[in-house]
Every structure is written in C-alpha cells, then in structure tokens.
C-alpha cells in the first residue's frame, strides 16, 4: 500500500473521480496548469484537458454560481475555494441557492452533484485572513453536508464519497495537515461513509470529540491524560452535517463525561450544538459539565497563533477538570 500525504490523497481521489466519470469537472482559482496554491490539483489539467480542469476568475460568488448551474444541468462539479476564509462572498450562493435548490422545486431539479473543496484552519502562520474555521456558519443550513477529514486515508475515501453523494457537500480540508499528515492509502477506489463518526480509541473515563486537525491534538492530550491513569474514548466526528449523534451519545452514556474541541471561536461554535444535544440525551448520566476547548472569541491572530489555538495542554487540562469535578 503506497504512502501519501493528504494533498496526494486528495489529488488521487480527484484523479479517480475524473477518470471514472466524464461529467466530473474541477475548477477554481489557479487550479489548472499551476495545480492550485497548495498543488492539490497538480497534473489534472494535462491529463483531462482544459475543458474539465480549468482556472476561474477571482470571484468566489461566481465560482459557486457557475457550479450551481453546472450541477443543475447534470454535471458533477468539484469547485475549489482557494482558502475557506474567502468562501464568504459565495455565502449567498451556497445557503440560498445550493442548499435550497432541491427543496424549492419539490425535487424536480437539484444540485446534488456539487462538491465544494476549501482549505481551512490555522497552524500555518496565515493570520486572520488565511486561518479561519467557518464550518459552524454552514452547519446552520439545511440542505448541505459538511465533511472534514483528519488524515490522507480519510481524505481520499471521504472526498470520493462526497463527489458521488446525492447532496451538495462542503469539504473542508485542514491545510496544516496537507503535507504534515502522512499515511498508507490504498491505490484503488474506495469510499468512507458520510454521517458516521469513527471511534478511534476506546476508553471508560471521558469522551473526547473533535474533527480534522484537532484529532492529532487530541491524541497528544490523551497521551498525557493516560499517564495520570485517565482512560479516554476518542471520537472523530468526520461529518458535521449530518453529525453522528448516536455514536457520541452511546459513548457518553458509558463514560459520563464529554470534552469537545475545535479551532473555531467558542461562541456559536459547533461544539455548542453537540453539547446541547448530548445533555438532552445523557443528562442523568453526566458526572461533570460538558467542556468545550476552542479558539478564542477574537479575530485569528498572527503573532499569537499558539496562544489562540486549542492545543493539547488546554485539552488535557479540560480532561483533568472533567474527571476531578
């Protein structure tokens, strides 16, 4: 089984999807011969031609409007937003057109073949315009699916599933893992289920929930917690919309404790939705308050990035507080 980093796994998934189906199109800013700012689309234009992998103007609203039109007519567009921070000019197209297309027509037409790829999150010293985690904005929008991989194996399997999914999918890629996360990835075609969380580690004292790049941070926190004799169960949500409430609730019913972490700011972050849903289902089983370890309620700072990010030390402190409550 070959070893790939996350960028190579994403490129491999796009190659497979385009090779299998002539209706799959890949476009965005600089994705053609340049291969995208992170090189995720390298060599796709030379292999499949300019008609199927091409550059767009620097207009995010136009990219998604164009993608909606293509998808409505039967194409399978994979649109790249160069940085998730710049998805906001396309916000109207995504929440008012993409998400509502099927509903407003009574299922006479839809844009279910649309996938929107966007590098997101901090950790690359990108400052306030290249480090944001905007997943919660879109999780409030019925009609979309939101997927976030944590490693190359997940990235390939989830991206192929997203491209073939009957609903429009926003695929957030943790860009600090693009080259840092390396692992074995099958060369063949495979898909991973959207909407199903994965229990990556079983434990009995506390449940930890995260997604994307935070899973690596959780692993480091768990190593410290286990030195204190704390048994941690770890869940990678993988999909935020829909999110796997059953798996999280089942775990919390066992452990009695829950710590949720994400890079996005605390207020209005998706951890709040998880906490509310789990306390409704597991209230009488909770041994301590549900904890959130998140980014700060400030614009993403440049020089204070390490202070802003919810690192392993903040998470292990939350674990200890939860167990010793």
Image (cartoon, grey):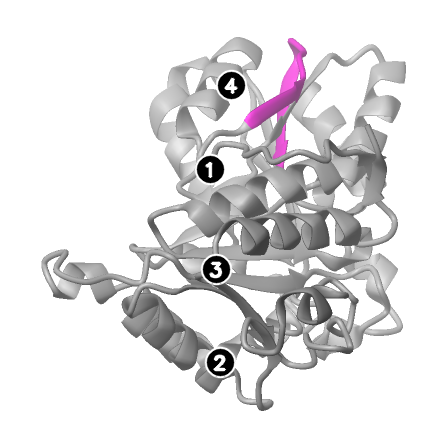
**Foreground residue, 73 or 159?**
73
Residue at mark 3 to residue at mark 1: CA–CA distance = 24 Å
**Which residue corresponds to the image point at 18% horizontal and 62% vertical from the top-left?**
109
Q: Which labelled disc corresponds to residue 22?
A: 3
Residue at mark 3 to residue at mark 2: CA–CA distance = 20 Å
In the displayed structure, would residue 10 be above or below residue 158?
Answer: below
Q: Which residues are magenta?
A: 198-210
**Which residue corresponds to the image point at 62% horizontal and 58% vertical from the top-left?**
264
* Residue placed under numbered mark 4 in the picture: 252
First reached walking from the N terminus: tag 3 or tag 2: 3
Could you tell me residue 139's position as x and y percent? Answer: 42, 54
* Residue placed under numbered mark 1 in the picture: 194
Q: Which quadrant is the C terminus positioned in? A: top right
Q: Nearer the viewer, mark 2 or mark 4?
A: 2
Residue at mark 3 to residue at mark 4: CA–CA distance = 45 Å
**Which residue corresponds to the image point at 45% horizontal and 86% vertical from the top-left?**
62
């Amino acid at each position: 089984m070959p070893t790939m980093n996350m960028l190579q796994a994403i490129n491999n998934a796009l190659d497979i999807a385009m090779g299998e189906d002539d209706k799959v199109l890949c476009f965005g800013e600089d994705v053609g011969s340049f291969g995208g700012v992170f090189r995720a689309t390298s060599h796709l234009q030379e292999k499949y031609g300019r008609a199927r992998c091409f550059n767009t103007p620097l207009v995010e609203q136009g990219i998604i409007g164009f993608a909606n039109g293509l998808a409505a007519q039967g194409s399978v567009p994979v649109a790249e937003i160069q940085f998730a921070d710049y998805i906001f000019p396309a916000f109207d197209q995504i929440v008012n057109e993409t998400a509502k297309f099927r509903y407003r027509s009574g299922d006479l037409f839809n844009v279910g073949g649309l996938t929107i790829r966007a590098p997101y999150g901090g950790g690359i010293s990108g400052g306030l315009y290249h480090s944001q985690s905007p997943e919660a904005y879109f999780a409030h929008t019925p009609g979309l699916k939101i997927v976030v991989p944590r490693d190359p194996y997940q990235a390939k399997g989830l991206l192929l599933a997203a491209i073939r999914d009957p609903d429009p999918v926003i695929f957030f890629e943790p860009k600090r893992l693009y080259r840092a996360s390396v692992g074995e990835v099958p060369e063949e075609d495979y898909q991973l289920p959207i909407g199903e969380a994965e229990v990556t580690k079983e434990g009995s004292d506390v449940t930890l929930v995260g997604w994307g790049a935070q899973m690596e941070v959780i692993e480091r926190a768990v190593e410290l917690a286990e030195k204190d004799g704390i048994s941690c169960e770890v869940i990678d949500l993988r999909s935020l919309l829909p999110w796997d409430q059953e798996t999280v609730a089942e775990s919390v019913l066992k452990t009695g404790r829950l710590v949720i972490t994400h890079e996005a700011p605390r207020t209005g972050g998706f951890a709040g939705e998880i906490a509310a849903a789990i306390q409704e289902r597991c209230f009488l089983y909770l041994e301590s308050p549900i904890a959130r370890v998140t980014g700060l309620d400030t614009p993403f700072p440049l020089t204070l990035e390490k202070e802003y990010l919810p690192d392993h030390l903040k998470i292990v402190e939350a674990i200890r507080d939860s167990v010793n409550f």
